[in-house]
Image (tube, grey):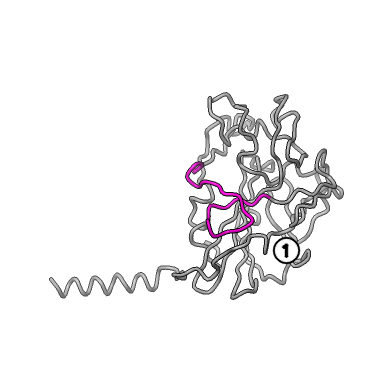
Amino acid sequence: MKLFNNKFILFFNLNLLFFTPIYSQERRNPIVDPLKYIPTLTFQEGGFLKTSEKNFPISINFNTHQDANGDGNLDPEDNIENMILYAIGEAVKGNGRTGLSNRGPNNQSPAVYFNYAETFSHNVYQYWYYYGENSHLENHEHDWESVFVFERDTLPVMVQMTSFGKLTNLQWNAFQKDEEHLVLGVRRGDHSFTTSPKNGVVIRYNGEIHAQQGVLNEGHGKMIPWTVYSSKDFTTNTTVFDEGKTTKFYYGDVAYPRSGKEFDSERKAPWRRRRWRRPRKNDE
C-alpha cells in the first residue's frame, strides 16, 4: 500500500509539473498602478454604413436608481433601457436606448475594470471594458472586451486583445503610442480591438475626450479621467468593486427580435472567467 501511495504521489506531482501553468508564489510588484499602461481608445466612424459608435466604456452600475425593465431589481439588466447613446459624462440625462424618456442622471464616465496577475515569467495588466450593448451583426445586451499587457521585468513586451471574437497576440511595438500608452482602434458596434487608430471619438488614457469625425452629443472637449475599478487591495488609483455582487449577465433582451427574452443567454462576469485568474500567452 505504501508503494502504491508513493507512485500515486509521483504521478500527481508530474501532472502538476507538465499540465499546470506556473505562477509566481510571491507578488513581484507590492503596489500596482493600472494607469501605467491604460490605453487610449479611438472609435470607428463612417465606413460602408456611414454610422458612428453609439456607446462607450462605462461602469456596469452607471444607473442605480431606475428599474427600467420592471423586474423589481436595480441591477445591470436595466442597462440597455437606461443607457443614453452618443454621450459621455458624469450626469447624463435623456432618452434611453429603447426609447424610455427621462433616463438618468447616468454616470457615463469612461470606466475600465482592472485585474493584475503574475505568471512565472510575466506581470499581466488586464483591462476589461464594459459596453451597454453590442449593436453589430449579433445584437446583444452587455459587451465585454479586454486588453492584456504582458510585462517582463519592468518592460511591456506583448499585448493580448479581443479582436473579432478571438484572442490576438501582438508585440508591444506593433502599436502606435500616445505618450507611451497604446493607441487602440475600436471597431464600431462589436468593439473589437485593432492596431489601426480610428477617426471617430477618442478617449485618451488621461480622460481627454474628442469627437473627431464621430457623433458625440455630450462629452466633446471634456477631461473626465478614467474610473478604474479593481477588487485588489494592492492597487492604487482605483475604485473598489465587489466581485461577488455581480457574477453573471444575461445577453438577451426584448429589444432584439432574435432574442425576445429579457433573461436569455447567461454569461459569466469577467471576474468569474479563467482568463481573469490564469492569463496565458496562447489563444485558448
Q: Position of residue 31 (x, y in %)?
A: 57, 64
Taking the view exactly as shown, the residue that stands out farthest to the left is 1
Q: Which residue: 62% across, 56% down?
A: 127
Residue 52, compared with residue 178, is above or below; it is above
Q: Which residue is mark 1?
A: 182
In the rendered image, residue 235 lying in the magenta stretch gets the answer: yes
Q: Position of residue 264 (x, y in %)?
A: 52, 35
Q: Which residue: 58% across, 29% down?
A: 260
Residue 97, compared with residue 183, is above or below; it is above
Going by the numbered disc 1, the residue's amino acid type is Leu
Q: Which residue: 39% across, 73% down?
A: 18
Main SS, magenta region, reads loop
Q: Residues within 10 Å of mark 1 (few under 14, many from 20)?
A: many
| SS at circle 1 | strand
Q: Which residue: 41% across, 68% down?
A: 20
In the rendered image, residue 8 lying in the magenta stretch gets the answer: no
Q: Position of residue 139 (x, y in %)?
A: 64, 39
On-image quarter of the N terminus: bottom left
Residue 38, compared with residue 219, is above or below; it is below
Q: Position of residue 284 (x, y in %)?
A: 52, 61
User: Start and end of the magenta stretch?
Assistant: 227-247
Residue 15, compared with residue 55, is above or below; it is below
Q: Is residue 118 left or right of residue 202?
A: left
